Image (cartoon, rainbow, N blue to C red):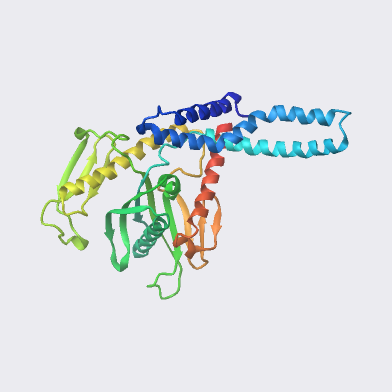
Amino acid sequence: MIPVDKVREIISRHKLLENKLSSDKVDKKNFAKISKEYSDLNEILVNAKHYLAYDETLNDLEKILNDPGSDQEMKNLAKIELEDLKKNKIVNEKKLKLFLLPKDEADRKNVIIEIRAGTGGLEASLFAADLFKMYEKISNKKKWSLELISISKSEAGGLKEVIANIKGNNIYSLLKFESGVHRVQRVPDTETQGRVHTSAATVAVLPEAEEVDVKIDDKDLRIDVFRSSGPGGQSVNTTDSAVRITHMPTGIVVSQQDEKSQIRNKEKGLKILRSRIYEFERKKIEDVRSKDRKNKIGTGDRSERIRTYNFPQGRVTDHRINLTLHKLEDFLEGEIFDEMVENLNLQAQDEKLRNLEK
């Protein structure tokens, strides 16, 4: 049961914003923010009004059904309308509960995505490269901007590690469920006996933090510089352009050596560091909130095995929601990624609703 005053607040807030937007009193600085809130309220307004009108409509229909003077045709219509009313109440209540759930402020942010080869040697690094290609294809399809921050290659076209910045609309809300261990089962090209090997890669998706989100004090940083090196320790640069930044209070360390410029490496390193600190602080708050809850979705735990890509069977399985799609190639091409995200979002919302009702 949703408190009536909460629903009335939605309607009155919508009216207030409507009046503001129709006047000339909204400055340009706040116009976009107010317009977005008004648009969000617009989507739930009809549900709110129907929810408030439920008791009155219910009484009117029951009067018809209990009135001896009502003809049978009228009673039949009232009976059908009553069934629809009760069904709609369930729909309206669920939509309102979802709307009233605490919003994740990070959902609208861009992301820093980090992919690392895990167990499995060369095959793991090849799989890490496959995952990165998949996120590149998804970004292209959605017209997101993907900027490479750092990359460490292995032999045969694999990746030991890759870090990228993805920008667009509501990126974090769509990619946050990707954090965790991704496992692959397939026959490597080097396997002569046709045996299926299992290897893994880890994915971390961090909301990109801006300076207003995380204040980093210079005195909390230790910055070491060193010469960048390539595969096998081969020198790439003859100057100390590589940077290692340690955030003393949290112990978070970031190394950056992709650029020839020390200043540019420091800028990139601080961008990653800021996002890691932001996520570190968010996780501390979430851990306190979820102390008595067990959430299967959206924990963002990098050690959690979340998905298996089985090539012999042509399937991808998400273990958090027990969803299997027998379209592995399509999934890796980014074609049916939205189907997975929608199912993950629905499960996460259901969990939040259950926790709200406890």
**Residue 216 in the image: x percent, y percent?**
25, 35
The residue located at (48%, 56%) in the rendering is 337
**Residue 67 in the image: x percent, y percent?**
85, 28
Judge whether 138 appears above or below 105 on screen: below
The residue located at (51%, 39%) in the rendering is 294
Residue 69 picture quarter: top right
Q: Nearer the viewer, residue 271 or 67?
A: 67
**Residue 99 in the image: x percent, y percent?**
53, 35
Q: Nearer the viewer, residue 348 or 6?
A: 6
Q: Which residue is outermost to the top?
A: 5
Left or right of 89: which side holds 83?
right
- Camera sees residue 301: no
**Residue 333 in the image: x percent, y percent?**
44, 62
Residue 133 picture quarter: bottom left
Q: Nearer the viewer, residue 244 or 138?
A: 138
Q: Which residue is outermost to the left?
A: 238
Q: Nearer the viewer, residue 216 or 154?
A: 216
Image quadrant for the C terminus?
top right
Q: Which residue is outermost to the bottom?
A: 192
Image quadrant for the N terminus?
top right
- Camera sees residue 307: yes
Q: How many marks?
A: 0
